[in-house]
Amino acid sequence: MKLAIVDYGAGNLPSVERALRALGAETERAIEPAAIARAKAIVLPGVGHFAAFVAGLRERNLTAALIAAQAAGVPLLGICLGLQVMFASSAEAPGEAGLGFFPEQVFALPATVKSPHIGWNQLRSIRESKLLRGIPEGAYFYFAHSFAAPASSAATVAACDHGLAFAAVVERGHLMAVQFHPEKSGEVGARVLRNFLESLP
């Protein structure tokens, strides 16, 4: 199955592409709505600013296509900022709407800790997860972010702590996302991507 990797100009797209191809996945870059419309599975990578991400999607007319794909049940994996954009909005860009797949707002990490949160941190499992299947409890993954989704979200399956708890992995049916960078997280990161590929119908 060919995966559509959404290309809105994100810096981490090539590294995500390489990581997926190393696992045997066939990928194509989706830069127009037609590529999203025909996709059987979608990866939404992202780095940078929330406003730039949603503007990039808008400028390429990809927003409506992603919402339609989600409504049609197409499997979708968000990575880093890709997770945050799947939520309703973000404190990083007041007034800008996210894709709204999850209802909560993304918040800034507290000023009491170093931000951005960069480096390895440990996951805490909340409930059973497709993406974390076969990964030991308390495994470490690589993070690089200043904003995060709430651990209290009903979709959160694993949390991480940096000043407070935040959502590290969210899953709801065909929607899955991770706040960390699996493509930079060694073997456990590769296992997360493999689990996504193996979950596809």
Image (cartoon, rainbow, N blue to C red):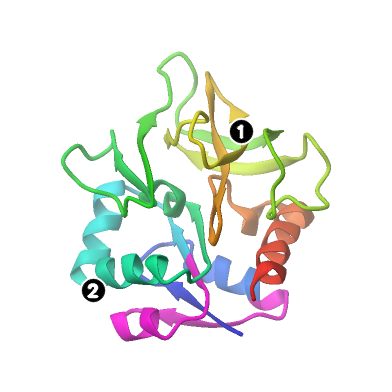
Would you call the spot at circle 1 few (<14 residues within 10 Å), some (14-19), or many (20 or more)? Answer: many
Asked if residue 80 can be seen in this view, the reply is yes
Asked if residue 8 can be seen in this view, the reply is no
Which labelled disc corresponds to residue 41? Answer: none
Closest to the observer: 154 or 137? 154
**Displayed quadrant of residue 35:** bottom left
Mark 1 lies on residue: 159
Q: Position of residue 93 (x, y in %)?
A: 23, 40
In the image, residue 163 sits, relative to residue 64, either above or below, namely above
Q: Position of residue 116 (x, y in %)?
A: 46, 33
User: Would residue 129 be found to the left or right of residue 109 on screen?
Assistant: right
**Displayed quadrant of residue 65:** bottom left
Mark 2 lies on residue: 60
Would you call the spot at circle 2 few (<14 residues within 10 Å), some (14-19), or many (20 or more)? Answer: some
Q: Position of residue 123 (x, y in %)?
A: 69, 35
Q: Residue at x 16, y 41 (%)?
A: 95
Element at label 1: strand
Residue 40 covered by magenta stretch: yes
Three-letter amino acid code of the residue under disc 1: Ala
The nearer-to-camera label among 2 and 1 is 1
Residue 13 covered by magenta stretch: no
Three-letter amino acid code of the residue under disc 2: Arg
Q: Quadrant of the N terminus?
A: bottom right
Q: Quadrant of the C terminus?
A: bottom right
The stretch in magenta equals 21-43
Q: Residue at x 49, y 23 (%)?
A: 114
Tally the marks: 2
